Each structure stands twice: as structure tokens, then as C-alpha cells.
Image (spheres, rainbow, N blue to C red):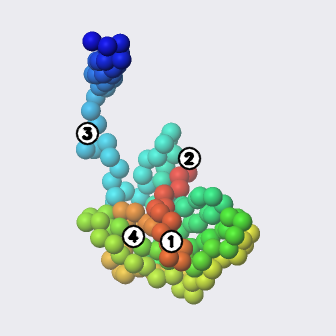
Amino acid sequence: MSTLRRYLAFSVALAAVVALVAGCTDEAEPTPNDSPSSTAPETPGPEGSVALKGKYLYQNAGLRVTADFDGNVGTLLIINKTGRDVPEPSLYIRAADDGARVQGTVEAASGIEDDKRKEFAFEFPPTVNPNTIGLLFLVMGEDDYGAFVPPTAG
């Protein structure tokens, strides 16, 4: 057997042993009750923080967007510090129960100049509220910027 083949065989065997040892822990498996409820007013977050129900945050590369729901309507605040103008916003959700895409309407949507902030009102169909939202997504112009996260307090 060549030196290279012996080295590869040893490496594969070592990787398998490491994987087996790493998989063996004595920690208890989480139970279904350990996951947050979509109907709770507050959801536990990292290090004792609490997710704020009906509030969402998108932050990336100088763009900060908050969405604040009151039932199926709300306020969208966009702060643009990207170094460029960004196009008009739109929103959609993926429903918590079945993942269906539900489009929202951003009233008087318009682009946001660099180093400016704008506030918009938005509305979703009456079936949408903080308890039925699986994920909230931001679209700027034709580009899907991705999902918001609930901001946390605490």
C-alpha cells in the first residue's frame, strides 16, 4: 500500500472516530415543550432576552428596517446608510401554519436616498397577524433582501 493510500485510510478512520465521539453526549434531548409557541406574547431569545411580539428587524450592510405590526397593519421604518439609493420596499410573509406566501401592501412606496430615513404604512390581508407569521421578508425593488428577525429586549 502506498504512503498516500495509508494516509488517506488513516484520515478517514480518524474522522469516523471523531464523529462518533462527538455524537455521544449525555445531554437530554429537547422535548416539544422546549420550542417557543407562536401564540405566546413573548418568545425567549438568546441569553435571557425576549423577542418582542409583532416587531421585526432587518439589518445588513448599512440598511436598517423595522416593521411594527398592530394586527394586520403596521409601520415600516427604513434607515439607509448603504452608500447608495435603494428602491421602493415591499413585504411578504410565509405563513406559520403552511408556509404559504402572502403579499403585503406598502402604501406610497418609494425609493430611499442614501443617508435618509423614511416611514411607510403597510397592510396585509386580515388573516395575517403576529401569531400567523412564520417569516417576514423584505423586497427592495425587484430584489428579495431576505427575512427579518424579531428584535429582542433584555
**How would you rate the neighbour count of disc 3 (Cα within 10 Å): few for under 14, some for 14-19, many for 20 or more?**
few
- Where is residue 128? Give x, y as percent: 36, 74
Which label lies toward us, 4 or 2? 4
Q: Going from the N terminus, do you reach mark 2 or mark 1 first?
A: 1
- Where is residue 131? Give x, y as percent: 36, 65
- Where is residue 148? Give x, y as percent: 49, 61
Relative to 136, residue 43 above or below: above
**Which residue sits at x=41%, y=58%?**
41
Q: CA distance from mark 2 to mark 1?
A: 33 Å
Type of amino acid under label 3: Thr
Which label lies toward us, 2 or 1? 1
Q: Going from the N terminus, do you reach mark 4 or mark 2 first?
A: 4
Helix, strand or loop status at disc 4: strand
Q: Going from the N terminus, do you reach mark 4 or mark 3 first?
A: 3
**Which residue sits at x=54%, y=73%?**
140
Residue at the spot of label 3: 31
The answer to whether 11 appears left or right of 121 in the picture is left
Helix, strand or loop status at disc 3: loop
**Which residue sits at x=62%, y=63%?**
64
Residue at the spot of label 4: 93
Q: Are marks 4 and 3 in contact (CB under 8 Å)?
A: no
The answer to whether 123 appears left or right of 83 in the picture is left
Helix, strand or loop status at disc 1: strand
Which label lies toward us, 4 or 3? 4
Type of amino acid under label 1: Asp
Q: CA distance from mark 4 to mark 1?
A: 15 Å
Q: Are marks 2 and 1 in contact (CB under 8 Å)?
A: no
